[in-house]
Image (cartoon, rainbow, N blue to C red):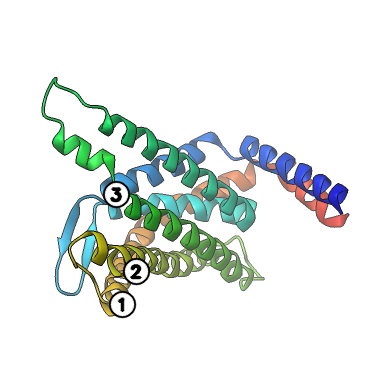
Amino acid sequence: MANKFRIRLKRELNEYKMLLRSIPATVVTLFVVSVICMNLLANKTLLKLDWIALDGGILISWLSFMCMDIITKHFGPKASNSISVLAAAINLLTCLIFFVASAIPSGADDYTVFDSIFGGTWFILLGSTVAFLASAVINNMLNRMVGDLFRKNPDGRLAYAARTYVSTFIGQFFDNFIFSVIVFVFFAPIFWDGFRWTVLQCAMCALTGAVAELIMEIVFSPIGYRITKKWQAESVGRAYMDYIEEGDKK
């Protein structure tokens, strides 16, 4: 049993290394940067009405989901989930560095605003990390499931649009909802003097936010489609996919 576990672990590590070598660095870089930027931009509320609340993260969250959709379409949901975990880990490391920088005292100037933004709040970081990872898995699995419905032309424009629109809307809804519940239902009443949202408010803000994110996806998804067609034509990551197929046959 132990020997089988070591063999399985070694194969998973080799698969992960090959995946990192196979995905074009530009897409991975944009994905990781977008996740970090979402965490920072979420500190500013852009719109707050009775029925909708949007933070600055919406300006770049479309890029995160577009990168996941591209990776899922070409490499599969497992690969996209793996890169999502990598992005979340790098984001946590970045937040730790930001926190250390904000905690170091400086008499050169008044850095109160800097420290409040980059110092962060631990339960907001917890909520955003859990919500991101959960929504990434939901998005990537739905993307593949919807794509499998288009058996006659799985690589067509309609198939790509359907799989990205459905997965993005549902994935973004759960991202917004899970984050809101963790932060504003569980922790905010404890640490923010009783301030809280109801579950209904969380659901409504998650829904309206998902609609806004879907609009962004509709605007930018043609870029993702062209990238996947280019990757397919150039056989990007062929060695990784051959490695996966070989493992499935064993």
Quadrant of res 128: bottom left
Cβ–Cβ below 8 Å for labels 1 and 2?
yes
Q: Is residue 30 shown to the viewer in this render?
A: no
Image: 93 above or below 132: above
Image: 209 above or below 103: below
Marked residue nearer the N-terminal end (2 or 3):
3
The residue depicted at 53 percent of the width and 52 percent of the height is 70
The residue depicted at 66 percent of the width and 71 percent of the height is 151
The residue wearing badge 3 is 121
Instruction: Count neighbours of disc 1 (C-alpha within 10 A) and say few if under 14, some if 14 to 19, many if 20 or more.
Output: some
Q: Is residue 132 shown to the viewer in this render?
A: yes
The residue wearing badge 2 is 181
Q: Quadrant of the N terminus?
A: bottom right
Give coordinates of residue 240: x percent, y percent: 72, 43
Q: Quadrant of the C terminus?
A: bottom right
Disc 1 is placed on an element classified as helix
Distance between the Cα atoms at labels 2 and 3?
16 Å
Nearest-to-viewer mark from 3 and 1: 3
Give coordinates of residue 152: x percent, y percent: 66, 70
Marked residue nearer the N-terminal end (3 or 1):
3
Q: Amino acid at mark 2?
A: Val
- Check residue 242 in the rendering and tell me which mark sits there, or answer none: none
Cβ–Cβ below 8 Å for labels 2 and 3?
no
Give coordinates of residue 197: x percent, y percent: 24, 72
Question: Of 58 and 44, which appears nearest the observer?
Answer: 44
Distance between the Cα atoms at labels 1 and 2?
7 Å
Question: Of 249 and 216, which appears nearest the observer?
Answer: 249
The residue depicted at 79 percent of the width and 52 percent of the height is 245
Q: Amino acid at mark 1?
A: Val
Instruction: Count neighbours of disc 2 (C-alpha within 10 A) and say few if under 14, some if 14 to 19, many if 20 or more.
Output: many
The residue wearing badge 1 is 199
